[in-house]
Image (cartoon, coloured by chain):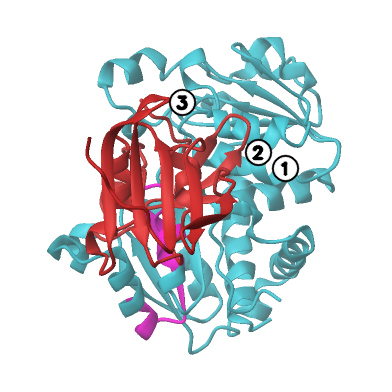
Chain colours: A red, B cyan
Amino acid sequence: MLSINSIKKGIVLDHIKPSLGMEIYRILKLDKADYTVALIMNAQSRKLGRKDMIKIENTIDLDLAVLGYLDPNITVNIIEDEKIIEKVELSLPKEVMGVIECKNPRCITSIEREIVHKFVLVDEKEKKYKCCYCDHMYSED
Amino acid sequence: MLKGRHLIDPEDFTLDELEEIFSLADEIIENPKAFNKICDGYLLGSLFFEPSTRTRLSFESAMLRLGGTVVGFSEPNSSSVAKGESLPDTIRTVACYADIIAMRHPKEGAPNFASPFCEIPLINGGDGGHQHPTQTLTDLLTIRVAKKRFDNLVVGVCGDLKFGRTVHSLIKAMSRYEGVKFIMISPNELKVPNYIRNEILDAKNIEYMEVERLEEVIDKLDILYMTRVQRERFFNEADYIRLKDSYILDKEKMSHAKDDMIVLHPLPRVTEIKMEVDDDPRAWYFRQAKYGMFVRMALIAKLLGVR
């Protein structure tokens, strides 16, 4: 079995749904990181059967709010001296930027080159977001 | 304080700020000549990324009647947009020349995107099927003049409620006043979008009903807001042809309406109001167009801070 050492200080994102790990890696811009990052895919999990994991060494200053949108069941462990010192509770972020795209063909985002897609949370219970430009509700299909 | 502000959404201004604009509009209606020099030396950038002769002429007449001048374009092919310039770049450039901008854009949310890049007041002159706040100011001023109040009115909106941005803006604006009820009359295919129903009507606990036939409800209305079924908002011609004549106001329907009901329409009308209704004293739509110019005069004066 592949072994990846525990980290001394940093963040461990655990219980990521299989195949979502790569997307999170991209969204958190970890491909551009100058610190050690390990993306583990399809690891065995008692809870999920299979899971993805991301271990990030040394850096704690990451905006993790978007994880709440992608999957609120991800476990976020903050590590100091090889010990978990905090488990971050994820919740739906008030704003989601540059992650999902507005599907309204009449939205300004459909034609402007460098526009960042921005959504605001309008219904926490139903996980409903609307485009902050054209007000259209986001739907996954 | 309205000086220097943008107007993107009908709800950008408080009710007190709207009242400020309407009070100035009242003064202008009373004596337009007294205001014909107040914008001397000021320039309006009139940026029409899609053609709209009526709205453009209303803005430009408003500025000229205040003693100001106008530059701009009336369709994007005659602007740098045709060369692939981004919206923020166009806005920033025009803001170097003009003192205030009126912008119409075919894409929804364009003014929300553009406004952070605009150092001078930006007025949304309509963005796709989304918002049209100066039409709302026009509608509100007309209602204020005709009914002398905004509260406790039954507002009927009829026709294309799905793509008709004037209706969306009007519902947003009128929902801010006490005791207003809405009756929404449209074919099933052209009902108001969910966000209007969920975020405005349901969220504010406002009484409303949705019906398919105007005849069923015309006797209950204080205001009847008719809209055109717009060809350009349809993805296919067959749907347009099938639905365009669904709701037509004529003398017979008017005979069931209250004596003091008023009929409004953002214009241009096509077939949805028969010409036989024009002579009815309850037909306010041409007066409404004139109030549109007056309210734009008041708005420009307030945003420039000259009054």
Can you give x and y, in whole percent of width and height, for residue B23 in the image? 77, 66
Residue under mark 2: which chain is it in? B
Instruction: Kindly indicate whether the residues beneath marks 2 and 3 are on one polypeptide chain.
Output: no
Instruction: Quickly name the residue at label 2.
Output: B171
Q: Are marks 2 and 1 on the same chain?
A: yes
Indicate whether B188 appears above or below A16.
above
Q: Secondary structure at mark 1?
A: helix
Q: CA distance from mark 2 to mark 1?
A: 5 Å
The residue tagged 1 is B174
In three-dimensional space, the C-alpha distance between marks 2 and 3, rounded to whole angstroms, equals 49 Å
Q: Is residue A106 above or below residue B209?
A: below
Q: Quadrant of the C terminus of chain B?
A: bottom right
SS for callout 3:
loop
Q: Which residue is mark 3?
A: A47
Viewer-side label of 2, 3 = 3
Q: Nearer the viewer, residue A37 or A103?
A: A37
Residue B257 image offset from top left, x and y in percent: 75, 20
